[in-house]
Every structure is written in structure tokens, then in C-alpha cells.
């Protein structure tokens, strides 16, 4: 069983997000990056499938500038066998169809049985890359997976539907499946894993110029959302904050 | 045809977001037709009989009695090819996430997802966990758009009627490769979040499992129930039946008191109907403050223990 896991590096949920001077994206110089949270669950699921099968290969693939080597290394430390970095300039690709096509051109060579990705990336949040790749490579697809069971040439997936409903779907392999958070408990890398990861291969792929794709959609500008709601801001030292909250609960909302 | 809205059935009736998508489609200008697929198609067409639309297109086929990604990707692609709409519009639902990217890849039409509003010729979508808005535009003649919950109000829909047209689509068994079982619900937990007057809701800002009891103590003095965001449930710190949001419960208590919840849309859709929202977050730019009535900027772990003390003494 040859499994690809797509792991994206994204700004951490508590990172500063200053706008870049041209206001097309953020200025990455003061951003702290982490592994996209659902991708961490996808990686764990791939490792569990391999361990259960007793054989196979888990290849972690990421696209972006050189900073993303950090998340590839992190995945290797957790147990992935090798890594592939699809190199990109500093400006990350924001057209999902172009992202999908670039991944598909690299994945095609490898003949994976299974491609696992996160349901959605925390930065651009397009929520479509795994499905695009599946379609481009002629694989079957499923999204919002919260349980997987691999069988001979098939995978059974429990999908999350809206408002507390679920559904089982059985797909023939090869398949591209996007993973919802919470389906397992991602491991931490062991010291041995961290040491071992240094020796594992990360192949760097620079897509050639003739592979340049024209974007069909573009992100033209980012801005800070404006609110219209009347909000009372409560801040200061802890004592003052607590006193005001008690007051609000008593006099404004009247719940105590 | 200017705009085609692809409708969704939610257990037999029109999905709420499909109705909002029709309203969104109207705001794009031009003619609006809708497509409904499967065994509920007639009753959904009936539901829309009082709404001003250009046409209601119906597809019925044994392979798409109920939803499956293979069949829907094929049918919607075929209809787009034969009808050539400029815009293809949907609600941003789980079903949309599941099959629409396949249509986008198959026909090489860009898919701009999860739109919250329109601005001139571009579409606005939240990025970076709702901390920023992005304007996205398409350079293609045709574009697929999905609208986030509540981006448009279905109250604005004009009364009227429309023609119904049955489309003949060829599908054979080789196209539907996956086997979908019937949807089911799991046993509910023993708390009823939906009827709680006050909810103390825990987010990842509680930092670790050992801090969870603080939330339960605060709930106790306030006579409240405890709810949680998804990451807290995923980590196993709180039972899943306490989750609020698109994949959890939809709540509207008198007071929603959140502790270290950032305010991602998938959480907010489940609680924005609350009468009062009081949020504690140490980040003054946290998106939850955009919908909060009371924005408490500070550390949950410092404020809440002191607050419990003060409430016990008062
Ligand atoms: C299809 C889909 C469905 C989803 N369904 C749901 C759902 O049903 N429910 C749901 O909740 N989410 C859901 N999510 C996930 C959602 O997108 C967010 O990831 C999630 O809501 C974030 O949870 P959080 O606010 O607890 O964590 P974070 O986003 O990590 O936020 C933590 C917050 O705590 C603050 N903080 C940190 N430490 C402290 C401290 N000491 N004191 C005060 N504040 C602090 C931080 O500033 C931050 O704002 C879904 C996602 C997808 C893609
Ligand atoms: N540049 C990237 N590098 C690695 N994985 C990616 C990249 N972009 C998207 N993905 C994968 O696709 C998933 C969905 O991303 P998106 O469609 O951008 O929301 C992510 O969770 C990742 O698993």
C-alpha cells in the first residue's frame, strides 16, 4: 500500500498576521508557521494504515517555499518514509485548480493507492485540493472522513454529514480522501524519530517553466473585516475585568 | 442561461442553504434557473413553485436516487455542458465540498468556495481562520460559486412561477464506482445543549485538559451547561455531544459565555443566534469579538478562577 499524505504549512492560530505592503496577502516575515491541523490527522491515519497492513510506504508531500521543509521533517520524524517538496516561490499559490494540477503532475509518476489530505487549509481555506487531485488522476474520492477501513483493493470510509448525521461509503482504490479532524490522536515524534528523520530523503521538485499554468481565479486583495455589532470591550487588570463581568451578568443579561 | 443554481435535498426538502443560494444567484443579475436531482426532485420543484425562476430543471436516474459524488459530478458536468450557464451557484454545504471540486477539475471551471459577500466584480471569502477577508475574482467565462450560510437572505425571494423541464441524462453503472450506505445518526448524549439557558463554551484557549474543570466550576455557579469547540472534542477533553457548530449542535441560549474560542465560521454558525454573547479571549483581534456583545480581552486561566470566587461570594 503506497500512501501519499499532503501536508501544508500554515500560520499558527495565534500568529500575528500583518498585511503585506501590496495587501495581496500577509507579510510572512513575522508569521509563526505550523502543520495545518487536519493534515496532522491525515498523516496519523496514513501511519496507522501502514502499521496495520504491516507493509507499505507513507510519502509526505508539500508544496511551497523552502520554509515548508520544517513540516516535511516533522512528518518524517513521526514516521513517514520519505518526503517530496514541490518548490514554489515565496508567494504561495492561491488558485486551487492550479494547486491541484501541480500536485497531480507530481503524484501521477508515483502511482499511489491512496492519497490523504486535510479537509481544509487554515490559510486559504479552499477545501477542495484533495478532491481536485482525485478527479484529475481518475481516482475515486470521499471527503470529511472520520473513520477508514482498508480492505483488499477497497477502502470504506465513515463520512461526517451535517448536524450529527453520518454515512459509510465504500470506494475502489486508488482513492483520494480528505480527512476531518478528530478521527485519531496524532502522535508526537519520538527522539529516535527525530534523529532518524535527518537521514530520510526529501526530494525537491521544481516544476519546469512549460508546466506554468494560467490561473483561472486570483486573490486580489486581503483586508481586515469590519464589524457592525455594538460590542462592549472589557479589559484592564483582572480585578476590574471580574467586577465588570459580574455586573454584566447581574444587571445587563440578568442571569444571576 | 445566466445562472444555474444546483439544489440540495436535506432529508426530502430543500436545504436551507440552497434557498439562500437562489437569493445569492439573483443578486448576480440575469436569469436564474435551478437544477434538482434524484428521488426528491419533484417535491423540491413543488416547494419552489411560488418563487420567480426562469426554469426548474429536473434529473432523475436510478444511479442518483440519493446523493453520491460520482453520479452528481457526472450529471452536473453534463448539465453545465449542455446549458452553458455563466455562473453555477450552490450553498456551501458538506455535499458541495464533496463533489463540486470534481466538476471544477473535469470542466476546468474555477470554483470559488464559501463566499460571504459580493463586491463589484469580485467575491469575498474569509481566509486565515476568519481573521482576514479576501477578494477573489475569476478570469474565466464560467465560474462556480458557493455561498456561506447566511451570506444571503431567502426572505428577499420574489414570488412568481417557472417552467419545469425534465432532462434526459445518460448514466451507466460504470460511472458510479463508490457504494454509499444510508445516512444515520448516532446516539445522543445525556445533555440537551439546545435547551440550556446558559452555556459556558470551552475552546482551545483553555490550553490543556487539566484546565477543563475550571469551565465546569464556572458552569456550576452560573447554573449553566458546558459546551465546546471541535478541537477540544477532538482532543478528547470533552464529550462529543457537547460540540457546538456546523458538525455539532445549533444553540441559541440566553447567554453564550465562551472561554478561549477563536470564532471560526464553523463554530459561529452553531451559536450566533444566542441572545447575548460574552467572550473571553486574549487576542484582541479574535473573530469571536466581531459577534460578541461583551469582548473580554484577557487570559481565561487568570480571569475565570477569580470570577468563580467573586460569583460564589456574591
Ligand atoms: C467542515 C468543518 C466542520 C467543522 N465543524 C466544527 C464544529 O462543529 N464546531 C467547531 O467548534 N469547529 C468546527 N470546525 C473547526 C473550526 O474551523 C475551528 O478550527 C475551530 O472552531 C477552532 O476552535 P477553537 O476556537 O477552540 O480553537 P482556536 O481556533 O485554536 O482558538 C483558540 C483561541 O483561544 C485564544 N486563547 C489561547 N489561549 C488563551 C488564554 N489563555 N486565554 C484566553 N484566550 C486564549 C486564542 O487567542 C484563540 O483565539 C470545523 C471545521 C471544518 C472545516
Ligand atoms: N501547498 C500545499 N502543500 C501541501 N498540502 C496542501 C497544499 N495545499 C493544499 N494541501 C492539502 O489539501 C488540503 C486542503 O487544502 P485547501 O483545498 O487549500 O483547503 C490541505 O489540508 C492539505 O492536505
Image (cartoon, grey):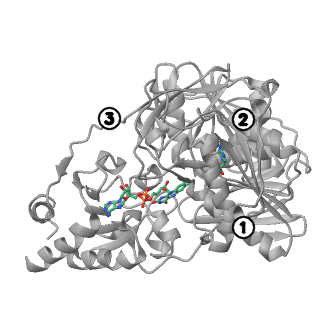
Relative image position of residue B131 (x, y in whole percent): 41, 43
Near-viewer residue (A147 or B254): A147
Residue appearing at x 51%, y 47% in the figure? B16
Where disc 3 sits, the SS reads loop
Relative image position of residue B203 (x, y in whole percent): 39, 64
Q: Is residue A21 above or below residue A156?
A: above
Q: Is residue B70 left or right of residue A185?
A: right
Read off the chain for label 2. Answer: B
Closer mark to the observer between disc 1 and disc 2? 1
Q: Is residue A242 left or right of residue A193?
A: left
Q: Is residue B310 above or below residue A208?
A: below
Name the quadrant where ligand 1 sits.
bottom left
**Residue placed under numbered mark 2 in the picture:** B104
**Residue placed under numbered mark 1 in the picture:** A196
Can residue B95 be spotted in the picture? Answer: no
Read off the chain for label 3. Answer: A
Q: Quadrant of residue A210?
A: top right
The mark that comes first in sequence, 3 or 1, is: 1
Q: Quadrant of residue B85?
A: top right
Where disc 2 sits, the SS reads helix
* Same-chain check, marks 1 and 2: no
Near-viewer residue (A90 or A174): A90
**Residue placed under numbered mark 3 in the picture:** A226
Where disc 1 sits, the SS reads helix
Amino acid at each position: 500500500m503506497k500512501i501519499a499524505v499532503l501536508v501544508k504549512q500554515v500560520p499558527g492560530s495565534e500568529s500575528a498576521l500583518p498585511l503585506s505592503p501590496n495587501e495581496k496577502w500577509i507579510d510572512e516575515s513575522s508569521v509563526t508557521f505550523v502543520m495545518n491541523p487536519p493534515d496532522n490527522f491525515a498523516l496519523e491515519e496514513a501511519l496507522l494504515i501502514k502499521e496495520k497492513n504491516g507493509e507499505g510506504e507513507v510519502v509526505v508531500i508539500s508544496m511551497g517555499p523552502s520554509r515548508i521543509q520544517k513540516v516535511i521533517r516533522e512528518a518524517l520524524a513521526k514516521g513517514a518514509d520519505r518526503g517530496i517538496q514541490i518548490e514554489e516561490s515565496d508567494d504561495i499559490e492561491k488558485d486551487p485548480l492550479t494547486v491541484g494540477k501541480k500536485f497531480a503532475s507530481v503524484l501521477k509518476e508515483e502511482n499511489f493507492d491512496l492519497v490523504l489530505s486535510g479537509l481544509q487549509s487554515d490559510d486559504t481555506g479552499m477545501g477542495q485540493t484533495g478532491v481536485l487531485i482525485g478527479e484529475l488522476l481518475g481516482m475515486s474520492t470521499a471527503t470529511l472522513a472520520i473513520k477508514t477501513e482498508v480492505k483488499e483493493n477497497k477502502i470504506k470510509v465513515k463520512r461526517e454529514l451535517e448536524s450529527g448525521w453520518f454515512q459509510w461509503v465504500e470506494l475502489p482504490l486508488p482513492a483520494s480522501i480528505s480527512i476531518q479532524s478528530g478521527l485519531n490522536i496524532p502522535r508526537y515524534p519520538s527522539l529516535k524519530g527525530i534523529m532518524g528523520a535527518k537521514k530520510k530523503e526529501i526530494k525537491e521538485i521544481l516544476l519546469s517553466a512549460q508546466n506554468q499554468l494560467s490561473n483561472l481565479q486570483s486573490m486580489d486583495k486581503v483586508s481586515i473585516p469590519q464589524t457592525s455589532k455594538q460590542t462592549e470591550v472589557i479589559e484592564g487588570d483582572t480585578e476590574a475585568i471580574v467586577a465588570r463581568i459580574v455586573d454584566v451578568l447581574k444587571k445587563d443579561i440578568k442571569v444571576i | 442561461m445566466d445562472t444555474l443554481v444546483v439544489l440540495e435535498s436535506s432529508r426530502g426538502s430543500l436545504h436551507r442553504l440552497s434557498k439562500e443560494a437562489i437569493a445569492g444567484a439573483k443578486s448576480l443579475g440575469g436569469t436564474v434557473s435551478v437544477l434538482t436531482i434524484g428521488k426528491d426532485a419533484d417535491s423540491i420543484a413543488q416547494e419552489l413553485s411560488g418563487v420567480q425562476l426562469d426554469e426548474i430543471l429536473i434529473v432523475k436516474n436510478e444511479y442518483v436516487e440519493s446523493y453520491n459524488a460520482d453520479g452528481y459530478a457526472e450529471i452536473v458536468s453534463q448539465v453545465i455542458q449542455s446549458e452553458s450557464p455563466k455562473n453555477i451557484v450552490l450553498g456551501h454545504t458538506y455535499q458541495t465540498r464533496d463533489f463540486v471540486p470534481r466538476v471544477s477539475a473535469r470542466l476546468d471551471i474555477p470554483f470559488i468556495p464559501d463566499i460571504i459577500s459580493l463586491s463589484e466584480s469580485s467575491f469575498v471569502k474569509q481566509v486565515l481562520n476568519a481573521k482576514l477577508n479576501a477578494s477573489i475574482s475569476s478570469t474565466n467565462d464560467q465560474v462556480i460559486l458557493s455561498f456561506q450560510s447566511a451570506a444571503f437572505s431567502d426572505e428577499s425571494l420574489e414570488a412568481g412561477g417557472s417552467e419545469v423541464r425534465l432532462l434526459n441524462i445518460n448514466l451507466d453503472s460504470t460511472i458510479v464506482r463508490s457504494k454509499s450506505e444510508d445516512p444515520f445518526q448516532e446516539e445522543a448524549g445525556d445533555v440537551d445543549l439546545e435547551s440550556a439557558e446558559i452555556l459556558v463554551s470551552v475552546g482551545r484557549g483553555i490550553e490543556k485538559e487539566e484546565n477543563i474543570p475550571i469551565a465546569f466550576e464556572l458552569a456550576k455557579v452560573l447554573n449553566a451547561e458546558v459546551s465546546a469547540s471541535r478541537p477540544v472534542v477532538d482532543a478528547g477533553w470533552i464529550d462529543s455531544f457537547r460540540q457546538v457548530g456546523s458538525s455539532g449542535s445549533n444553540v441559541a441560549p440566553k447567554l453564550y459565555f465562551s472561554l478561549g474560542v477563536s470564532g471560526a465560521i464553523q463554530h459561529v454558525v452553531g451559536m450566533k443566534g444566542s441572545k447575548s454573547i460574552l467572550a473571553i479571549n486574549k487576542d484582541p483581534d479574535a473573530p469571536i469579538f466581531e459577534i460578541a456583545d461583551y469582548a473580554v480581552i484577557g487570559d481565561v486561566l487568570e480571569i475565570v478562577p477569580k470570577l468563580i470566587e467573586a460569583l460564589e461570594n456574591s
